[in-house]
Image: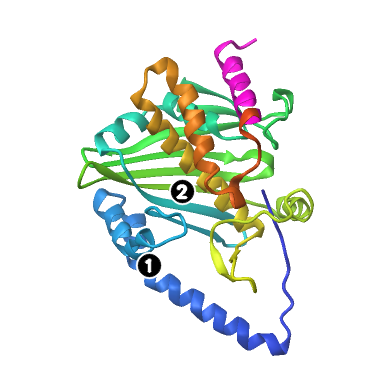
């Protein structure tokens, strides 16, 4: 989950690096007005302003549907953001995603989540997750994560849910999940899912070792250019990793919504089916396990959750 690297810039590469920096800063300035509006005053209007700024990317992209994904690494923390137009009316989205138990169902679809329970006390509501490094590791190897859960805005056309923890899994900190949604015309919604955490030098070194061995060849979604054979050159390293996880969580939200049209007893299986089918549309980035094995592990996780020892 972490990656660290150093740079040595020789004189002949200095100009190239300077030009790249100028391009990156220019791109940030171009995107600043809409994102600043959202950050300063979270609202339906702010989120729709972001959608307007992303209109071209939402219309033309590798996903073949209105999705925009981006990531950032400031040296201390990582962040992945997914923006998407989804074919669900806002009233249904808001009703489905404003309860903590719903989020436990969402989290359980993810490969690395073994258990999730809701805890409430005088300090508020939290999701208590048990997470493993590798999806088929036993529950005894799980690390606990308590995410404070808050609905920070809920109006007839805007929803904002925040989950955060000072301590993240596997040595990370300041773990943050944010979901924002607003209504669109035609019974659709615009959704923003953000996934972020802070790192240390040690966690980045651990990630470097992982990416050099077991994670070798894993990539994200951002296209940096083309290889000599014309295939896309996808971003790798730690930003590729955070992009993959952000997309997995977003697809888990969408799978949860897709399963609401069947009887409650059938929703768990449909969520698994929808999530696995969605991630397999991006095998280069997200294929980690065969369908049968995924279903086997997740059904066992579900049984453990329903019948704790």
Q: Residue at x 61, y 81 (%)?
A: 17
Q: Find the magenta span and give its range.
A: 293-309
Query: Is residue 123 visible from the viewing direction of this image?
Result: no
Inspect this view and state whether residue 57 appears: yes
284 in magenta: no
Q: Tell me which colouring the rendered structure shows.
A: rainbow
Characterize the local packing of mark 2: few (<14), some (14-19) or many (20 or more) Cα atoms within 10 angstroms: many
**Do the residues under discs 2 and 1 have CB atoms within 8 angstroms?**
no
Q: Is residue 175 above or below residue 59?
A: above
In which quarter of the view is residue 136 placed? top right
> 276 above or below 105?
below
Q: Looking at the rendered structure, which numbered label has been put on residue 32?
A: 1
**Residue drawn at point x = 42 percent, y = 27 percent:** 102
Magenta portion: prevailing SS class: helix
Residue 239 locus on image (x, y percent): 60, 57
Q: Nearer the viewer, residue 166 or 170?
A: 170
Where does the image place residue 282, in percent across and percent down from the top left?
55, 49
């Amino acid at each position: 989950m972490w990656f660290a690297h150093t740079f040595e810039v020789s004189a002949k590469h200095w100009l190239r690096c300077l030009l790249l920096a100028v391009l990156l800063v220019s791109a940030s300035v171009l995107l600043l007005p809409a994102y600043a509006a959202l950050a300063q005053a979270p609202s339906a209007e702010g989120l729709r302003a972001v959608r307007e700024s992303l209109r071209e990317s939402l219309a033309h992209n590798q996903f073949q549907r209105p999705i925009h994904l981006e990531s950032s690494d400031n040296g201390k923390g990582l962040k992945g953001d997914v923006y998407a137009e989804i074919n669900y009316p806002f009233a249904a989205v808001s009703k489905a995603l404003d309860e903590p138990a719903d989020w436990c169902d969402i989290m359980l679809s993810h490969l690395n989540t073994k258990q999730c329970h809701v805890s409430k006390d005088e300090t508020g509501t939290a999701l208590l997750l048990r997470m493993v490094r590798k999806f088929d590791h036993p529950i005894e190897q799980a690390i606990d994560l308590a995410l404070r859960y808050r609905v920070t805005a809920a109006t007839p056309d805007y929803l904002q849910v925040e989950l955060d923890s000072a301590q993240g899994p596997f040595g990370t900190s300041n773990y943050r999940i944010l979901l924002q949604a607003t209504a669109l015309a035609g019974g659709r919604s615009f959704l923003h899912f953000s996934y972020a955490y802070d790192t240390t030098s040690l966690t980045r070194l651990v990630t470097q070792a992982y990416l050099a061995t077991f994670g070798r060849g894993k990539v994200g979604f951002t296209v940096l250019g083309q290889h000599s054979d014309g295939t896309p050159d996808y971003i790798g390293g730690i930003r590729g990793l955070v992009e993959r996880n952000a997309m997995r969580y977003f697809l888990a939200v969408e799978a949860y919504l897709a399963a609401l049209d069947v009887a409650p007893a059938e929703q768990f299986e449909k969520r698994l089916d929808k999530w696995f089918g969605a991630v397999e549309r991006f095998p280069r980035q997200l294929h980690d396990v065969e369908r049968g094995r995924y279903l086997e592990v997740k059904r066992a996780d579900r049984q453990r959750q329903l019948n704790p020892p």
